[in-house]
Amino acid sequence: QVQLMESGGGLVQAGGSLRLSCAASTNISRMAWFRQAPGKQRELVAKFTSDLRPNYPDFVKGRFTISRDNAKNTVYLQMNNLKPEDTAVYSCYAWYMFKEYRGQGTQVTVSS
């Protein structure tokens, strides 16, 4: 059983920054960050591809950066120049041994 624990969410003004962390109970290659706002579908915001390269949708390119510290089994999401439309619950996902795992999520609120 894999456990994922996110941290780092909070309230920030537009234009500000936050860094989210996702600590896994074991070393996992395939990890990603998704978000979901009220009344909206879940959307991918950053992921590591199968060859461990970062990948982003256009709406966060240049603002969000995914990184990892394998020694700590932790993946980070650095979010800069945040916008009110980035407000959502951000969740860490991992795929390990043919199963999908999700953290409990962390709220990010961006005020205008």
Image (tube, grey):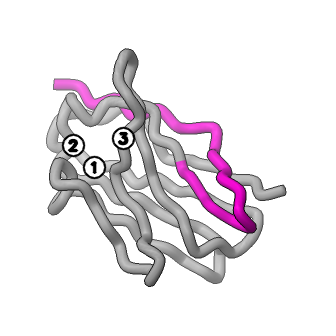
Q: Amino acid at mark 3?
A: Glu
Q: Amino acid at mark 2?
A: Leu
Q: Position of residue 111 (x, y in %)?
A: 23, 25
Disc nearest the viewer among 2 and 1: 2
* Proximity of marks 2 and 1: CB atoms separated by less than 8 Å: yes
Instruction: State the SS at label 3.
Output: strand
Q: Amino acid at mark 1?
A: Ser
**In the rendered image, which residue does mark 3 sit on?**
43
* Residue 105 relative to residue 107: left or right: right
* Proximity of marks 3 and 1: CB atoms separated by less than 8 Å: no
Residue drawn at point x = 20 percent, y = 29 percent:
84
Instruction: State the SS at label 1.
Output: loop
Per the rendering, the mark at residue 17 is 1
**In the rendered image, which residue does mark 2 sit on?**
82
**Mark 2 surroundings: few (<14), some (14-19) or many (≥20) residues within 10 A:** many
Residue drawn at point x = 18 percent, y = 36 percent:
83
Q: Position of residue 14 (x, y in %)?
A: 17, 35
Give the mark, 3 or 1, whose residue is nearer the N terminus.
1
Q: Is residue 3 magenta?
A: no
Q: Position of residue 109 (x, y in %)?
A: 35, 29
Residue drawn at point x = 35 percent, y = 72 percent:
54
